[in-house]
Amino acid sequence: MLLSDFLLQHGRTAPERDALVHDGVRWDHARLAAEVARYRTALAELGLGRGDRVVSRMEADPDAIALLIATMALGAAYVPVAPELPPARFEAILARLEPAAVVVSSDLRDAPGVPPGTQVGPLVVARTAHPVSGDTTAPGPEDAAYIIMTSGSTGQPKGIVMTHGAAVNTLRGFSELGVPSSARVGTISPLHFDFAMFDVGMALGNGATLVQVPRMLAYQPRGLVEYLDEHRVTQMHSVPSVWRPLLTEGDASLLGGLRHLDTILYAAESFPAKDVHTLQGWRPDLRIVQCFGHSESIGCCFKTFANPAATFKGRLSLGVALRGTEMFALDEAGREIGVGEEGELYVRGPHLFRGYWRDEAQTRQRLVPDPRTGEGAVFRSGDVVTRDEQGEFYFIGRLDHQVKVGGNRVELSEIEHVVEGDPDVAAAVAVVPADEARATLTCFVVVRGSKPWNELMVRLRSRMSAAMPRYMVPRHLRRLESFPVLSNGKVDRLRLAQMAAEPEAPAPLRTPRNPSLEVP
Amino acid sequence: MTREEFQANIIQYLATQASLPEGWSCGPKENLFDLGVLESFDLPRLVAHIERMLDRRADLKSRRSEVFFTLDTMYEAFVGASKEGSCAP
């Protein structure tokens, strides 16, 4: 089955039911199907077909979802990127993917790198200079449905290619957590974050309603609560960070004000057990579900917590593998881990990604033969996990230097690569402070030459802002004469993480005083 | 509230929050994220501060994080625009 068919399947049986709700806009399934047809026609008229790529740059709203489905239905791969992407990164993605079309919201039609296009509804559909595939045959489950661009360790974003069949398999597996057609699923993730794809699939694929929550409400707890209640959201999907401001306010009545909410589903980063317990204390009737996985598989397991949620070694359970999927963890000797032991997580099943876009080397590192048998293909995650007596898994950390910032995947080496591109930088190491629940990045820099540090900091910040998404730009830049090293000569990242957490860490960049704006 | 009053207030707030040295300041068009003074994790508290200052709910539904980039963009979004009715009373 195609992912686009999976998303539209309930429109035939319940065309009048709400499909998408966004602020003052409401589309039923019939309207969604009509809008999908309109965008599909617009793309087909440009000559696009099976095997092409369409880069989409816009906020999440009903038209963005219609475009997403239309692109997939045509057999082209949908590639969402952030509206606020720096021009250099946007152009790097276009150069890497060679998309036949770029579609943007009207306000971005003049953004750098966006070719001239035609207005279709509120979107601008633009043909690029790259050739189309010319393949007008019907797509199949093995075709790419979408490509998620994520941070790459080599300094360039990498594309995770997900097929229709893999995505449908995953979404069917997660449907077992229970999404009734009466559900109104709240989504706040931006479209370039594949959590949004999960939300779209869980809602539309189960005949439920997707309520699109404006992203900025994540910064305004009372506004978020009002919006969710006004739109009768029953099941809210988000990263834990979205709930953190409510927890910080410590006002239980806020959560109590969500009269329709019965489920909180989170993913993409850890939620400290104490915070989950607080939410459960505020609203004992609430079902809290953790979903876990990777962009390379959307997800592989989920856990619905008892109240209070149990912990093992102080951590919350990830659950067990979805039906039809296998998760296993191997220690350094290649043996499957026992209870309480730690090892690297592998995932096997029909829902894995196809590979990284035009990157055979990286694909071979992550899609490997099953180490136990030497056969098939399993995803080597790089996650360190442990397991309990029931076989449930628990996340411990990463084997590499990949971290999560607000749910976004960040390769620290990509930051280092950008900083080290400056001629006055000898070396750079980016870390997450050791004792912070949130990932506030710090980059340590060893300088060459005599450039004043304040001037160099300004230049480095400009350089990073131009090359990377905002969430990847470290808040703190700190100069060191040299990096601490381990006995084997490697940089002591643990020590740097501890240094980044020390209270005497220098304040952010100070600029010269501006007399016109002095604090009275 | 005038632009100058708004911006001076925000500068004072940021200086306190980020433990910046006394007398720290920045230009109205300088990008506060690029300066390392602000990041997305700080926005809930900043929004709450602006709402307390203006004594009204800020309408964020149609905004992007770019409105917090500079003192100027914040003023335009939360004070200047209110004259045209874009902010909730």
Image (cartoon, coloured by chain):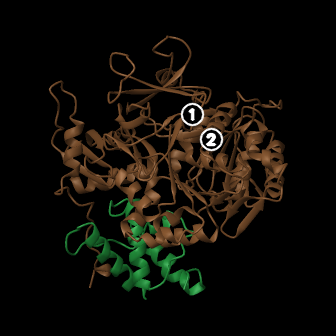
Q: Which of marks 2 and 1 is nearer the N terminus?
A: 2
- Picture quadrant of residue B70: bottom left
Can you tell which mark lies on residue A176? 2
Of the 4 image quadrants, the one containing the N terminus of chain A is top right
Q: Mark 2 lies on which chain?
A: A
Q: In this view, does A362 lie above or below A100?
A: above
Could one spot residue A172 in this view of the protein? yes
Identify the secondary structure beneath mark 1.
loop
Q: Where is residue A21 in the image (x, y as percent from the top left)?
A: 69, 62
Can you tell which mark lies on residue A322? 1
Q: In this view, does A128 lie above or below A110?
A: above
Q: Mark 1 lies on which chain?
A: A
Q: In this view, does A207 lie above or below A376?
A: below
User: Which residue is located at x 79 percent, y 48 percent?
Assistant: A10
**Rendering colour (chain A):** brown
- State which chain is coloured green: B
> In this rendering, would A379 be left or right of A273?
right
Q: Distance between the residues labelled 2 and 1?
A: 9 Å
> In this rendering, would A430 be left or right of B75?
left
Q: How crowded is mark 2: few (under 14 residues within 10 Å), some or many (20 or more)?
A: few
Of A410 and A429, nearer the camera is A410
Of A448 and A404, nearer the camera is A404
| Dot 1 amino acid type | Leu
> In this rendering, would A432 be left or right of A61?
left
Q: Determine contact: label 2, label 1, CB under 8 Å.
A: yes
Residue at far bottom of view = B1
